C-alpha cells in the first residue's frame, strides 16, 4: 500500500509534463504552417542590376576581291640513283649545286632559294615474279628539293626552263601568290562587313525591329594559291621558255557579326 501511494502521488506531475510537451509541439507545427502560408506573398528578389538579356542577331558575311598575282613559287627536285649511297649523294650534290648556281645566275636572290626536303633511301630488287623472296638492296637513291620564289613573273618561264636543263628532274608544281596580301585583304574585309550588315538589316526589318549596336565581330579568311602542275620531261622538250599564264587570284574574307536588336 505504501508503494502504491507513492506511485499515485507522481501521476499528476507526469501528466502535466506530457501536456506541456504536446502544447509546445502544436505551437511549433502551427508556426511552420503559417510560414509556408505566407511564403507566396513575399516578393522574389530582382536581378542585381535590373537589366534584361538583350535580343541579338548573328549574321555571317563574305567579301571577295580578285587580283593579278605578282609572285610565283616553284618546287623542284634532283633525284639521283646509284649503286652505293656515297655515290648517289656525290652525284646528287653536284647536280643540285649546278641547279642552284644557274638559278642565281638567272637573277634569283639567295633569300628566295630554300632547300625543301632531303632524303636518301635504298632501292630494292623487283619481287613481282617472286613476292616471297627476301628483300635485296640493289642501290640507293638521293633526293634533294629546292623551293624558288620568283618575284618577277616575267622570268618564271625562263626559270623553269633553267632548273630543268641544269639537272632538276622533278618539278612539283607552281603556285601563284599576291605580295602584301594581308594589306590587300582590307578591301575584302570591308566588303564582308557590308555584306553582313545588309543581310542583318533585311532580317531585322522583316521581323519588325531595328539593328542596335555591334556586340562582337570575328573574322576568318583564306588565300588559296592555285597549283599549276608541270612535268620535267615535257619541259625539257620545249625549245623556248615555258609559257605561263598567272590569271587572277581571289582573296576572300569572312566575318561573323553579332548585333543587339532594338525593339
Image: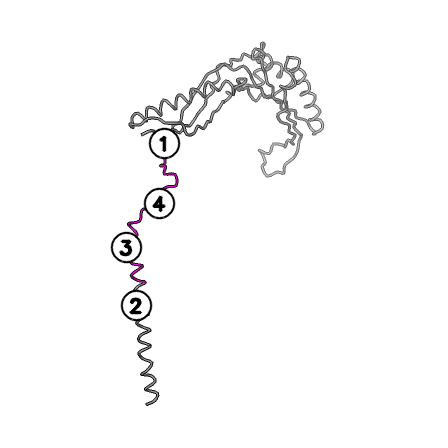
Judging depth in this view, the residue of 210 and 233 nearest the camera is 210
Q: What residue did someone put label 2 on? A: 23
Q: What residue did someone put label 4 on? A: 45
Whichever of labels 2 and 1 marks the residue nearer the N terminus, that label is 2
Q: Residue at x 30, y 25 (%)?
A: 205
State how far apart marks 3 and 2 are (Cα).
21 Å
* Residue 170 at x, y percent in the picture: 59, 21
State how far apart marks 4 and 2 are (Cα).
36 Å
Whichever of labels 3 and 2 marks the residue nearer the N terminus, that label is 2
Q: Residue at x 45, y 28 (%)?
A: 218
* Residue 97 at x, y percent in the picture: 69, 20
Q: Residue furthest bottom?
A: 1
Q: Nearer the viewer, mark 4 or mark 2?
A: 2
Q: How many numbered markers are drawn?
A: 4
Question: In screen coordinates, is 65 left or right of 163?
Answer: left
* Residues drawn in magenta: 28-56
Amino acid at each position: 500500500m505504501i508503494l502504491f501511494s507513492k506511485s499515485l502521488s507522481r501521476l499528476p506531475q507526469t501528466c502535466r509534463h506530457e501536456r506541456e510537451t504536446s502544447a509546445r509541439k502544436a505551437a511549433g507545427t502551427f508556426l511552420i504552417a503559417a510560414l509556408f502560408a505566407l511564403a507566396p506573398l513575399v516578393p522574389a528578389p530582382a536581378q542585381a542590376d535590373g537589366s534584361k538579356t538583350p535580343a541579338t542577331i548573328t549574321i555571317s558575311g563574305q567579301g571577295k576581291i580578285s587580283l593579278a598575282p605578282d609572285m610565283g613559287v616553284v618546287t623542284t627536285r634532283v633525284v639521283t640513283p646509284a649503286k652505293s649511297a656515297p655515290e648517289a649523294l656525290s652525284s646528287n650534290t653536284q647536280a643540285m649545286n649546278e641547279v642552284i648556281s644557274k638559278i642565281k645566275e638567272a637573277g634569283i636572290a639567295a633569300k628566295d632559294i630554300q632547300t625543301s626536303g632531303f632524303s636518301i633511301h635504298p632501292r630494292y630488287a623487283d619481287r613481282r615474279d617472286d613476292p616471297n623472296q627476301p628483300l635485296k638492296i640493289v642501290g640507293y637513291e638521293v633526293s634533294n628539293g629546292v623551293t624558288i620564289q620568283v618575284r618577277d613573273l616575267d622570268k618564271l618561264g625562263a626559270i623553269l626552263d633553267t632548273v630543268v636543263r641544269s639537272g632538276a628532274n622533278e618539278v612539283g608544281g607552281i603556285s601563284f601568290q599576291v605580295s602584301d596580301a594581308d594589306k590587300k585583304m582590307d578591301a575584302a574585309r570591308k566588303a564582308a562587313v557590308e555584306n553582313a550588315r545588309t543581310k542583318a538589316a533585311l532580317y531585322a526589318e522583316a521581323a519588325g525591329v531595328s539593328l542596335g549596336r555591334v556586340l562582337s565581330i570575328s573574322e576568318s579568311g583564306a588565300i588559296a594559291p592555285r597549283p599549276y602542275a608541270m612535268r620535267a620531261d615535257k619541259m625539257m622538250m620545249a625549245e623556248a621558255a615555258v609559257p605561263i599564264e598567272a590569271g587572277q587570284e581571289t582573296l576572300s574574307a569572312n566575318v561573323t557579326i553579332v548585333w543587339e536588336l532594338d525593339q
